[in-house]
Amino acid sequence: MAVYYGFTNGLPDTELAFTALFVKVLPPWMLYLVLALFLIPFVSFAQNNQNWGGSLLVENFYKHSLNPTAGAKKLKTAGILAMIYILIAANCIALYADSLIGMTKLLFAITAGVGPVFILRWYWWRINAWSQLSAMGTALVYPPVFDWLFANNKSMNLLITTLENTFTLEYYPIKLILLTVAVCSTWVLITFITAPTDRAVLRNFATTIKPGGFWKGFESSGKSFSKIRGFAWLIQTANGFLVYFMFWNFLIGNYFLFVGLLVLFILSFFMAYTLIAKANTLYDLSFKKKE
């Protein structure tokens, strides 16, 4: 569409062409709505990561390693300083970043293979702190090493080129797939060669949280109602794609379809929320029956 309206001729930056597309296509009164639609998720995402990152720095680093006896007042001050640090660091990165898509690709690259360990730790007793630490560490180290090998190692270059031609894929998706396999393989290996978490800690966690999944020998129902949760996940995944169709119809002026898709998005969101609530209720009931 950017090509159709002639932006790529005057604006070689495709990201800038995408932004200019809204100004060219939409009536002036809708620009405020577009700004709000972009600003709301941006602020929500930024605040979420600021709070989450600050809590990790305070609870897992400052309180655990630097000041274990810190009181509530000191922890609050440390939390505020940590959030300010994250805000400044994020702004510095944004100031020197020259491509939004480049930053997005970097974010996906340094998190490839990390997600499974953070999810499975709730369902598998064997995962320990070394599992998570190795996943995060290798996820940071492997991407630049992967790029260097592709540029300097003939065997690696030949392998990637062959995969590109065989599966008709570009370099980046192949990179993500191989990084995911490499990171997951690393943290699984580290899990089995390191000692498991102390059984007293595991027992306390299992008794308090009552996790589903594989907790052999601990107080757990072993049920997670995965079918219901999986269906809810599929609905939310479909909603992620639905957002693009919504905005596309909004851009081309098909407002009736846009409203219809918006209603469908909202209904699907609440359906997924209801399914998750149902799974949680059934999960709680399974323990009451045991008691």
Image: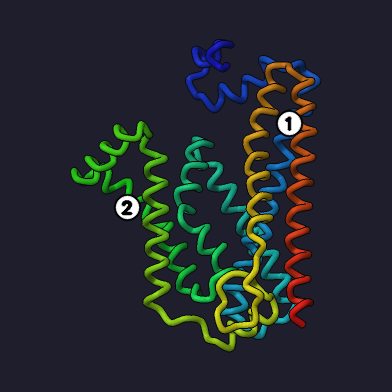
Q: Amino acid at mark 2?
A: Val
The quarter of the displayed image where residue 5 is located: top right
At horizontal 70% and vertical 35% (from top left) the residue drawn is 38
The quarter of the displayed image where residue 219 is located: bottom right
Q: Residue furthest front?
A: 289
Q: Nearer the viewer, residue 17 or 175?
A: 175
Q: Please indicate whether residue 285 sits to the left or right of residue 102 in the image.
A: right
Q: Report the coloring of the rendering.
A: rainbow
In the depicted structure, whether residue 202 falls above or below residue 91: below
Instruction: Categorize mark 1 by other alpha carbons within 10 Å: few (<14), some (14-19), many (20+).
Output: few
In the depicted structure, whether residue 204 falls above or below residue 8: below
Residue receiving disc 2? 145
At horizontal 75% and vertical 44% (from top left) the residue drawn is 269
Q: Position of residue 144 (x, y in %)?
A: 35, 50
Q: Nearer the viewer, residue 85 or 266?
A: 266
In the depicted structure, whether residue 181 falls above or below residue 220: above
**Marks 2 and 1, Cα distance to the nearest angstrom?**
39 Å
Q: Position of residue 207 (x, y in %)?
A: 68, 82
Residue receiving disc 1? 35
At horizontal 69% and vertical 22% (from top left) the residue drawn is 249
Q: Quadrant of the N terminus?
A: top right
